[in-house]
Amino acid sequence: MILQNWWYTTLMGIKDPIQPPLKGDIKTDVLVVGGGAAGLAAAMALREKGRRVVLLERNIVGGSSTGKSAGFLTQDSELELLQLMRRFGVEGAKALWEAPTQGIEAMVSTIRKYGISCDLRKQDSLFLGNNRSGWKDVQEEAEARKLLGFPYALYDSRKLPTVLGSINYAGGVRYPGTYAINPLLYAQGVKRVLIDQGVEIHEASEVTGIKDHTAFTHLGSVTADEIIFCSDKLKCSVTRYCLNTYHAQTFLAISEPLEDKDIASFFPEEPFQCWDSDLVYTYYRLTGDGRLLVGGGSALTTFSKKDVTTPRVINGVIKRFKRKFPFLEHVEFIQYWPGRIDTTRDLLPTVLRDEKSPWVHYVLGCVGLPWATFCGNFAAIHVTGHENCDDMDYYRYFSIDRGFLIPLWAAKIVGKQAVFSLNNAWSKYYQKDQQETLPDDLRI
């Protein structure tokens, strides 16, 4: 396999040029820092409100976490619906589930409205259980969906092979309303739309510091009434909030195109986007040209400080995947790439206005493109005024000082890696923020 991001490969032949880096000093109404899903959503919302917008991206637009992702447009990121119910009760879970649902709708609407060519695929989601404990997870997820009135279909180990070509799962729960895209082509497509709408975009323009209303790059500066940071992997030289995120490592690989008979065996009815119940889960889907996209990681490298660039981890993921689907043993994977996903301590995003500099806003740790899109749009709406907004509860859910098992100061003792990995596990399986409205039979 070649160490190369497949999505970058698909940019070959695209005529749109890279936007030149910022040179000189400029002024605008709002500066958006970061050209991933969150930053693009923020810029779109601001332009719709008639604001002058400048967007700075240190890579190419979509070139970081967004353009290295698997392109799943699903509400699930790291927390399933049942886990949200355990933490926040029925109403809280419903409100939080609505956030990425709105993110999905916004992305799909943008793609269709502007005719963005990014391999948009309507693919139902299929959450799969490994072993007996996984089957319990799947059943409880189905019960949570039933309680909230969300559509779903539950498959036990006997019925599952009618929709997925494997007898090696204990069961699965399927739900509709989800999609898949080529995330880098999506980001570059939105970039073209924003430029056409008058947004000034500068790629290869990393923000190195901020003072008052001015953000500085190596070659220039932007002075703005409001500044929204939607960038991942922020440096501590830029903001103290760099301490509030960590960067979990994952890996993806893309195959050669599958033969029609293999696709028919793999998905007897229609293609799904799938992931399993393991803590470090394996996920996979088909692209529009019939390639197999497989991702995952290992317990040893997910929170490792050092980047792994050898194919060792992804080869292990592929090997385990092929055990589930022996008839795909002959399929060759041609490219693989690692990525770092920003996450908070409890796997939910953080959105805030800086108390010391209230004109500076932050969108941090968004795991999943729909969550990022919602949060970028949410931040932009509240920059332009929230007098008529009825969504202020999201500031509480996404507060930077919400409840965590282990505080940040503990990182000085046990290390940031341990603080985030332990908090992540706690939030996923044990944390309970609100219990009043959760039925007894669904308490964990």
Image (spheres, grey):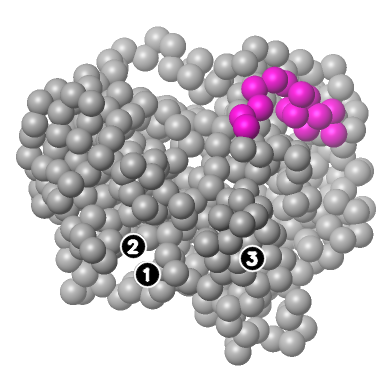
Q: Quadrant of residue 35?
A: top left
In x, y percent, where is residue 53?
16, 42
Residue 348 left/right relative to 47: right
Magenta region, mostly helix, strand or loop? helix
In x, y percent, where is residue 216?
20, 36
Residue that appears at 55% across and 37% down: 340
Query: For the residues marked 1 and 3, what is the alpha-carbon distance in whole angstroms?
Result: 19 Å
Q: Quarter holding the C terminus?
A: bottom right
Residue 337 left/right relative to 349: right
Residue type for callout 2:
Leu
Which portion, as a residue range, is magenta? 306-320
Q: Which residue is identified by label 3?
A: 427
Residue that appears at 73% across and 46% down: 280
Query: Is 370 located above or below residue 11 in the figure?
Result: below
Residue that appears at 30% across and 31% down: 206
Q: Tell me if mark 3 has few (under 14), some (14-19) or many (20+) residues whose alpha carbon lies within 10 angstroms of its own.
A: many
Query: Is 32 located above or below residue 316 in the figure?
Result: below
Which secondary structure, mark 1?
helix
User: Does the magenta portion include 208?
Assistant: no
Residue that appears at 62% across and 38% down: 305
Residue 193 left/right relative to 284: left
Query: For the residues marked 2 and 1, what is the alpha-carbon distance in whole angstroms?
Result: 7 Å
Q: Report if the CB atoms under discs 2 and 1 are less than 8 Å apart.
A: yes
Camera-near label (2 vs 1) is 2
Query: For the residues marked 3 and 2, what is the alpha-carbon distance in whole angstroms?
Result: 20 Å
Which secondary structure, mark 3?
helix
Q: Nearer the viewer, residue 302 or 384?
A: 302
What residue occupies the far top of the structure in this picture? Answer: 13
In x, y percent, where is residue 443?
73, 80
Q: Is residue 377 visible?
A: yes
Q: Which residue is identified by label 1?
A: 395
Q: Tell me if mark 1 has few (under 14), some (14-19) or many (20+) residues whose alpha carbon lies within 10 angstroms of its own.
A: some
